[in-house]
Amino acid sequence: MKRFVIAILVSNISGVLTRVSSMFTRRSFNIDSLTVGETESSNFSRITISVMGDDYIKEQLVKQLKKLHDVKEVEVFDDKETVMRELLLIKVNNTSETRQDILAAVDIFRSKIVDYSPSALCCELTGESTKIEAFIELLKPFGIIEMCRTGVVALERGSNCLKSE
Amino acid sequence: MFRNIYLFKRDDIHTMEISGAKIVVETLIEQGCDTIFGYPGGQVINLFDELYLNRDRINHVLTAHEQGASHAADGYARATGKVGVVIATSGPGATNLVTGIATAYLDSIPMVAITGNVPCSLIGRDSFQEVDIVGITMPVTKHNFIVKDVKDLADTIRLAFKIAKSGRPGPVLVDIPKDVQVSKCEFVNKPFESPFPMICAKEELLRQAAGLIADAKKPYIYCGGGVIAGNASDEVTALADKIDSPIGCSMMGISAVPTSNKRFLGMQGMHGHYASSMAENEADLIIAVGARFSDRATGNKDKFAQNAKIIHIDIDEAELHKNIPVYLGITGDVKDSLTRLIRLVDEKKLPEWNGRINELKIKENETLKPSEALTPYDIIDIISKDADKDTVVVTDVGQHQMWVAQRYPFEIPRTFISSGGLGTMGFGLGAAIGANAGTGKKTVLVTGDGSFGMNLNELATAVSQNSPVVIVIMNNGVLGMVRQWQTLFFNKHYSNTTLDRKTDFVKLAEAFGAKGFRVSTGEELEKAFSEAYNADGPCVIDCAVDCDEFVLPMLPPGGSIDDMITDVERGDE
């Protein structure tokens, strides 16, 4: 079982996200994260899905996705040839004893403080999922109040792109 | 007064600004649809009004229940190869279609289901008879639509037909809110649209297949429903002749190859013919065409056909390696692929392998034991002796279905109609009515008392349509297939499979206005069937069958060929 990222170009119409996600449920594939948004053309949306699975799941997923009428293009991304990013917002307890340690962690990870109150700090961090996870681990001892992650977005390096035919 | 109203409506046609309801009917006709099945209701009144006005151009078959209509549209499609169309109202009308749509989806049957819905302004408010049918049917349709602007209506229906029949066929649902049926817009007929471009196999892969065939000493051609859907029967037999190979099939592949073809071994799998399953197991090369290796066909996948390399040709790329890892997967239209493959293979003769096949056939015949009583096989033999070769034989689901699949000598593609993938009990009567409406041919429904009980209300439809459908009920008073499993694997705990019913099927038939017969011997059946077959309208033959008849051979669920059960000792419960 490995984690892989799939980029899907779909028609930008209502119900498409349900179609794609319901296929995952029906075929018993698990979604780790899912992001969706409009592309450079308003006719298309781009869905980026991160999945845990083996080669069988990877192959079936791509083939089943291609069968959906609203799916225009599907690509599985290779780790090395892809730029992947995720955004994290995380709120941790802010006390006079821990503040300096938290700020050090924020500094080392090149995170940003985006909100500050006497009892809580909110940080923003962008990076690959592994970096995000490491940062969360680091902040855990200080007491995480709440957090949210966007899930992975990804683009291929170089001039290649997902294009609808 | 009424006449004036109609004249007014007819005038609309000339202005070419017409209502959504009329657009639906005009587009259906444009798409070549001559018969639709359905049931009216509040949110499709406008549509049914247009059907009334155009009743000389398009035939509507009113069923007793929307489920029956959906199976009828499916049966129509299976028998004719055309797209079956069903119409239902919103809410319960729409949800009643779901089993029929799922049945068509699992067997890749081209179908367009049209549902009404509450007006757009009421959607999402839990209005009366409102249901999200697009959401409900998403996993059981090839695609579905809700049309919220009348301007999109005609093209959406056209696209629905195109999707339904292109590539691997399947059902498509179009949900049309009532206000869209009422709104008007311009309508221009468009020329009949051809399906999406054919998917052609890569030449290199076909060359590799030819190489594997050249090396094979024990080939076995395995046909699925795709051979029928893809109209590739002749190509299959031509390939078999050229490479001297036996042919087997899945249940959905039945009728693709004539039973009289000496290479044909019949169905393989859980209840397949001994020779067909054994030959598949011994083969060194399986050429699977338009089949999907369902669990009912393969049994234990880890032990399936271990001696063979598998070439898998299918129009749906996702089927390759899905259920069984194959040696060579080829995506492409089966007719085109086989035509090109035949040109690439050299003629060969395999006397040794065919000798072995003959041994298997002889052994298969030895396992058939003669019996005094009227056996299910006797019933099927009597039917097939009397019925014309082009008679469409429909089944429900259960033991009777397997007996027909094993025994009936089908000769012509599309004459066997049965719910394979979903295994829908209650499928048969609706499908038989649809098959008859589509072909105009005599139709025989072989069913069981369990299956028939599920949707027998469609007898009313058969009577009102005067459909010449002969319904043969193999009546054993039990849910035989489940009982068989209970006998074999559940210590004869006949939990809820004994139908302690007092239904008199002869009186029932008469109550519906059909003819009824009751038989318990071969002689009586011959007489009754001959009369029923030559009658104008529907007839029901209640045919007594022993409740401990077994479908054999049988591979136990999850078992392999080594676990094949060919004989069962009968005992008391």
Image (cartoon, coloured by chain):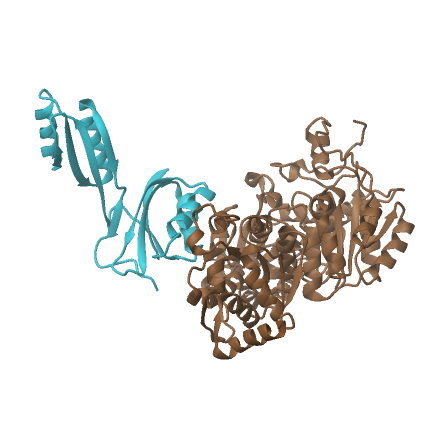
Chain colours: A cyan, B brown
| In front of the other: B443 or B131 | B131
Q: Which of the 4 image quadrants contains residue A132?
A: top left
Where does the C terminus of chain B fall, quadrant-wise?
top right
Query: Does residue B110 appear to the left or right of A35 in the view shown?
Result: right
Q: Could you tell me if residue A27 is visible in this image?
A: no
Residue at the limit of the structure toward the top, as seen here: A97
Above/below status of B46 relative to B292: below
Where does the N terminus of chain B fall, quadrant-wise?
bottom right
Q: Which of the 4 image quadrants contains residue B260?
A: bottom right
Query: Does residue A79 appear to the left or right of B432 in the view shown?
Result: left
Residue at (18%, 28%) from the top-left corner? Answer: A92
Where residue A66 appears, as percent x and y from the top left, is: 41, 55
Residue at the limit of the structure toward the right, as seen here: B523
Residue at the limit of the structure toward the bottom, as seen here: B14
Residue at the limit of the structure toward the front, as seen here: B1
Disc count in the image?
A: 0
Where residue B355 appears, as percent x and y from the top left, is: 72, 53
Q: Could you tell me if residue B505 is visible in this image?
A: yes
Where residue B494 appears, as percent x and y from the top left, is: 73, 29
Where residue A41 appears, as percent x and y from the top left, is: 27, 61
Residue at (45%, 40%) from the top-left corner? Answer: A28
Q: Which of the 4 image quadrants contains residue B51?
A: bottom right
